[in-house]
Image (cartoon, rainbow, N blue to C red):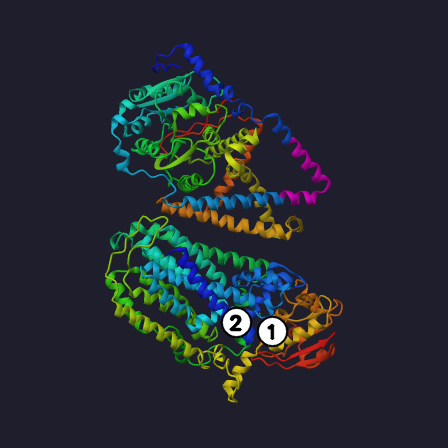
Amino acid sequence: MSRPRVGEESEEFRAAALDDAVNGLARRHPLASAAVAFVPWQKYTAISVAALIAISAVLAPLPTLITLTVICILGYTAMMIDRLLIFSRGLDASAIVTVTDEQARAVPDRDLPCYTILVPAYNEPEVVGDLIAAMTSLDYPADKLQVLLLLEEDDDVTIEAAKNSGVGDVVDIVLVPAGDPRTKPKACNYGLHFATGSIVTIFDAEDLPERLQLRRVVAAFASLPETVACIQAKLAFHNGSQNLLTGWFTADYALWFGYLLPGLMRSASPIPLGGTSNHLRRDVIEEVGAWDGFNVTEDADLGVRIAASGYSTAVLDSTTLEEANSDPINWVRQRSRWYKGYLQTWLVHMRRPRETFRALGPVGTYRFTLLLAGTPITACINMIFWFTTAAWILGQPDLIAALFPPYIYYLSLVSLIFGNIATIYMYLIASRESDNAYLLVPSLTMPLYWVMMSVAAIKGCWQLIRNPSYWEKTFHGLSVPGSTKETIDEPAS
Amino acid sequence: MSRRETWTVFAASLAVYLGVGLTLSLRYGYLLGDALARTSAAQAVLFSRDPHVSAIGYIFTPLTALAQLPLVAFSSWLPAITRWNISAIAVSALFMAGATVMIYGICRDRGLTKPYSSIIAAVFALNPMIVFFGANGMSEAPFLFFACWAARRLIRWVHTDDVHDLVFAGIALALAYLTRYDAVAAIAATTFLVAGVTVMRQGRAKWRTMRRRALLDAVLVAGPGFSAFVVWTATSWLITGEALAQLSSNYGNAAILEQSGGGATGTLLGNTAFVVTAIVVLGPTLLIAGPVAAVLAHRRRDLEFLVAPVMFGSVLAFQAFSYITGSTFGFLRFYICAIPLAAIVVVQIFAPQGNPETRRTGKFHRSRSEHATAKTGVSAALVALSVGGMMVTGWAMLQPSLSAQQYALRYLFDENPSADADALAARRIIDSFSTERELAAYLDSQNLPEGSILVDTVYGFAVVAASSRPDQFVVPSDQDFTTILNDPAAAGVQYLLTVPNSGRGESDAINRRYPSIYDNGALEFSFVFEAPNDGADQPDWRLYEV
């Protein structure tokens, strides 16, 4: 498909591109799209399992509960062990890909490849102006850098704000034709039709990427093997000290991007990408199918698809600063979308379990399940076990004693105590190594954050069943003093 | 330091400690009570008539006993494992060999060559006190291993600022706490040290900017130990109702002290003299090497020097303070930390060479500056000093006045014991628990059903450990012990093993329920026989029939 200049595309081109953006993946790889959340066999399996549990619960309540408890505890223990293993691998200084400033600047401008940055934005008039500062501060020759600001064509407030801020002088504004699903991946897919770069990345409008990030990516791609299709930069927050929630979120990201992702890179595992700063090789993403417009965590999905296609992702030691959600309700909405998306992604890639097993390998499939399915499910189940523990400490009721026969009691005690303490300790280590000593209190109070995660997980699981492709919009600009927050109800897809 | 070096040092030390330990136990029958008691606790977890993990006991921290569980699991096929304390000996040998590896590692981290490191490690490993405690199954061995591991990591951390070193030091200290609770002093002291070192990382003028980071580093090193303390205390409280059982329980330290006639009986000055003497005889090189190392460290601006005195010194100070104020016994082994302290201080006299390898160099790492290597003469002098120190320790171990528990070793090889008081007392110490083994053999031969013999483990641990059928005993760790104690006949108990109701025997549960049972069977039970004890500080047993 020939690439028209932005603003000069024909109506046919727009319609075709929109159609491809929404349905392209489903057409080329029918089972790879989350357009349908559950395929029939998954639906029947889920219903049968639920029925089986219900019947056994009636016929033999105690053995059923014990079996369920044992399964949960084994799952917890597996996740805890894996997380410790991955963390210890990621803590090595050599785990992450490091490109020094000299190496980054070593490539002369004329040898740099063309780069496309996609900036999808919806209903974000207050931050679209920030894009100017972020893009102009990037150290990359202007003639090789294409920045596409992707706005929905009926998003008048943002288009107006964009025009007024003069951002059109620095970037190309692409108007995405209106249509459902109204999601970020659909917009990115649409924007890809205009992209001229051989490396593509996504940034949010309010992101502050590190100046040399693009040059570092180029240098990294040159030194890494051909099979590396994506380079993920680290994400961090500039407003970590705003309140306890942003502190938790900052510690969360510090651990994930600083140590768990590099550890995953060193282990046999697909890598769920971050929402932004994932630098992709154009030719590879066209081959594997770009983003899934129906998946609410399209980044995680693409990461798994990259691994399942035989490619890999590397983690780069370069940081993009974002804004952490400082409002609890907003945070829960965002996190519930992530958990829903993780489950969506897992379900999509488990539609042909044998194929996925062959593509990712046994360890890769195991880790993929632990990460994408395990995280949201354990977050949900946590609530039940917290109540059980509280009841046990307060009254030691016999029912709970019966639920935990000796062989599972000690394992669950160890996984509870040791697991929680070890996790908090990992956050403390991550805070120290990310040079964020002010995260001491948030790290120590992590259990409260886990309660919020549990609430978000329950919400996400519920939404998965009721409304899979509904995109819970995150509001930005909350760290800007004096900004007004309006709660706008998002229309369902 | 290569893997080959590690395994060579480990294997060599392990061979020595196992060899000595098995000889002492199997050939001479010389066992130590505290070690045998832990073996008995481990055995109770698996093979008592009511096996459960909390049988490990909450008076003392559990790690040494728990470490024996894998070996004790085989004791139902090989009763000798518990009877001759082999599981405990294996555990202490393994850990003491580990401690030797750590000392060797500290030498290599400092940049010493292999020959010198081997010599210093050998002088440590062959120190008579170290050999004895690597061989006898006591908790000093795991404690020294964890303390030396923590010291090694912290010494490295001073220059590398590597978070791995800090984290492992914290974990090692937590494990040391789970071995002996004296580690609390070490944890507290090292926390302050770590905070102090971090706060000064950017120089004295900028200490304010480093405050937060210093706090974080302190939390990282103290966190595991603090968590271990909280979890252990909470578990103890949940299971037994007493949070700090080692202090408050009837079987605990304070009670033992009172019943045995107290710890320090002299004046404040006299007690202090004992403490100082004990430390000096265990680490005589400290007298010379200490000041020399301090001066050199000051000249080199070397903070590494502070780690060992702070860590081991705090434990020694804690023990000294406890003894002087009369709340603990005057045992030489409580000051065993002086030995690794002396070894490390000697190492610190050598100038540092190179930098140890790090997995993640910290933000404030400093390369150690190059200094000239020590002259051969100096090194030889230090070695001679250390060997001399070893001999002083060996001599001290054999003096009854200083070494109440170990001096009997002097008489071990005496084929024809003389009749003087010391020799006789030593003979009795060596023969400890032989009567209990005979009792166990007799009871085993009666082929009694499960739960036939009621006994408390204050003294009874030795009988239970020596028996090949521990389930025939009803012991306090059984959850129905109190019910059975109140009505033995109804529960099918046939015999009661009793001890005199004096001294530590006062804490015996049978004596507390039936105070006159030893004297006259509490007018309920009939006397079967008395077994006068050949061992020292062991009771004359009386068996009563229900």
Disc 2 chain ID: B
Q: Is residue A98 left or right of residue B405?
A: left
Residue B170: quadrant of the picture: bottom left
Q: Is residue A103 above or below residue B481?
A: above
Which residue is found at the position 29% from the left and 70% from the top? B380
Mark 1 or 2: the one toward you: 1
Which residue is labeled 1 in the image?
A: B459
Q: Is residue B372 above or below residue A81?
A: below
A60 in the magenta segment = yes
Which residue is found at the position 60% from the left and 46% from the top? A388
B319 in the magenta segment = no
Tell me which amino acid carries mark 1: Tyr
**Residue B518: image tag:** none
Which residue is labeled 2 in the image?
A: B254
Residue range corresponding to the magenta coloring: A46-68
Of the image marks 1 and 2, the number of the one nearer the N terminus: 2
Q: Position of residue A344 (x, y in %)?
A: 53, 30
Tell me which amino acid carries mark 2: Ala
Residue B457: quadrant of the picture: bottom right
Q: Position of residue B301 (x, y in %)?
A: 25, 60
Label 2: how many Cα within 10 Å (few below 14, some 14–19, many 20+): some
Query: Judging from the image, what secondary structure is the residue with disc 1 in?
Result: helix
Which residue is found at the position 47% from the left and 37% from the top? A269
Query: Judging from the image, what secondary structure is the residue with disc 2 in?
Result: helix
Q: Position of residue B414 (x, y in %)?
A: 51, 83
Q: CA distance from mark 1 to mark 2?
A: 17 Å
Q: Is residue A20 left or right of residue A432?
A: right
Q: Quadrant of the C terminus of chain B?
A: bottom right
